[in-house]
Amino acid sequence: MRITTTDAAYFLDSGSYHLTVSRTDPSAELEGWTTLSLIASVHPHGGRDETYETLPPVLALRGDTAVFDVQQRSTAWETKTVRLTCTPETIALEVRVEGAGVLGDVTLLGGRAVLRTGAAGTFRSGVHALGVFSPAPAHPVQVVRPAAAAVALTAVGDASPGRLHAVFSPPPLVLAFCKEQPDGATAVPGGPWLGASVRAGIPDLTFTEVTYEPLDGGALLRLDYEGHTEVRGAWTSPAVVLRAAGSPWEAISHHRADLVAHGLAPEGPVGERHAWWSEPIFCGWGAQCARADGVSPVELSRQDLYDGWLARLEEHGIVPGTIVIDDRWQLAYGDPWPDEAKWPDLRAWIAGRHARGQRVLLWWRAWSAEGLPAEECVTDAGGRAVAADPSNPAYRRRITAVMERLLGDLGADGFKIDFTQRSPSGSHLKSYGSTWGLALLHELLAALYGAAKRVRPDALMVTHTPHPAFADVSDMVRLNDVLELDARGEPVPVVDQLRYRHEVVRRALPHHLVDTDQWPMPGRAEWLAYAEAQPAYGVPALYYAEAVDNSGEEITAADLNSVASWWWPAR
């Protein structure tokens, strides 16, 4: 690390980057990429944190690390300091405050201020890139979007406009910037790239989302704490870590390695991998949707229908090692037990599948309050149950009892955990404990995972949570629902989406199995292309047996014979 100093600035040459830290205004120039704003705001809930004075940066050298502290006078906190920590490979930016308050949202790489020059309002970092990569599948499909487009990395969403960005919930909290214009929904330009990731372990992930908010050539990052994180004394934000990369995939690998190096994510496999986990899967949801004619697909999670679908598949050489009974086999989502009108004897049915060498997973709707007393739930201002509350000991005891019933008494082999994107969100919501945001989602999954493994150590827990710090609450990561159109309204090939999502998961959680999913498919030809590609990208999962739901096209005997030859080539 070579550092030279003038009256105006510090000049750093690390060998990997060139950084100029101004001594006269709160900014730093990362050559070729960004003019970093060294203003940050830690807004208390219901108020604003505005900087009204910034002091010149103070440099401290610690071996091959240079640390710059920029003290700022704040309207909300007794002290506030933005810190840049520069190593030979990385630049990390964080803000530290002292005082008392409850966090609303926090902005890094920019914030609100009134400067000595008289300039006032919101300041942002300058963005000298043309494209930004998002690891979070969203609609419309745009893997690398213009740098002027916003990105949300979140565990809050659904299928309504502007909210279908939590297919991975949470995704790895990393963006990557490039110098070329993006071209195509899943195309990834060549390098160089600059990764920007969030360094935080589970205890510090008490925000619901990170948003990249660009405007007129500038941008900042916003972490939304929603009034659920209390500060008493000193508090330091997660750091935004900047590092050069050869590709966005390498940026995700860097993100994981950074978390592991700081003790914030597991380094290797968390538990034993069992051979049956890698067997091809049949999930009945696509077949339920294809059969739905004037009724909801959830009404078609029935024992007789599953028997018929599995019998047809077996006629053509498809004998899945794992069967997922999908929505809605249970009477109540929050406290599940089989609906005997649909599954007259699920215990015997599972035993029968076991006798045939197959395993059975049950679909689990995360967060659902259905069937739960309000006192075990996150509640709104009117006392209505909004979501199950894993911070509540009573709910965790219920989870233990449910796992003993479903895995022990019923004999199920694990769970496909869905809807983690329904994380509770709202500053007025009330929970038993103080955990919130991504950390509360991890607490929910940890309760499910721990209780399941105590009953069945080989229970398979499938999630769609490819954040490196969630490695300890999942055995297999599902690639989740396939999307349809790009920003121009054109269909996006489903295999291209499969490749993109698989690479995100492989880089973020390299020791985990991948459930390749298969729903929804736009038509028979795309379904066949997807099915043929699946074995190369993880555990293949078959969702259809009779027809493709979106197009209504029949699945022929020849189609099923092809799937059998692709998935079991040695037979």
Image: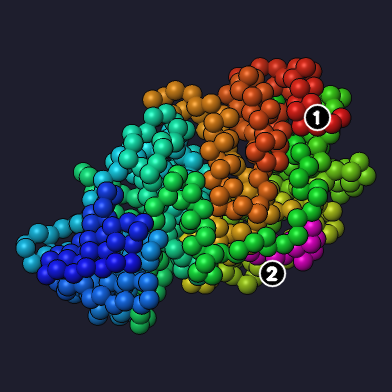
Q: Residue 318: x and y, percent?
A: 82, 30
Q: Is residue 295 above or below residue 24?
A: above
Write the residue at 80% across / 60% down: 456
On screen, 230 above or below 282?
A: below
* Residue 7 against residue 547 in the figure, above or below: below
Residue at the far left in the pictured view: 117
Query: For residue 369, what is the image quadrant?
Result: bottom right
Q: Which residue is mark 2?
A: 397
Q: Amino acid at mark 2?
A: Arg
Q: Tell me whether the residue at label 1 lies in contact with that at label 2, contact meaning CB atoms closer than 8 angstroms.
A: no
Left or right position of 319 against 57: right
Which residues fall within the magenta stretch? 444-459
Give the amino acid type for the residue marked by disc 1 in the picture: Pro
Residue 374 in the image: x percent, y percent?
57, 63
* SS for callout 1: loop
Q: Which residue is mark 1?
A: 569
Does the magenta portion include 455? Answer: yes
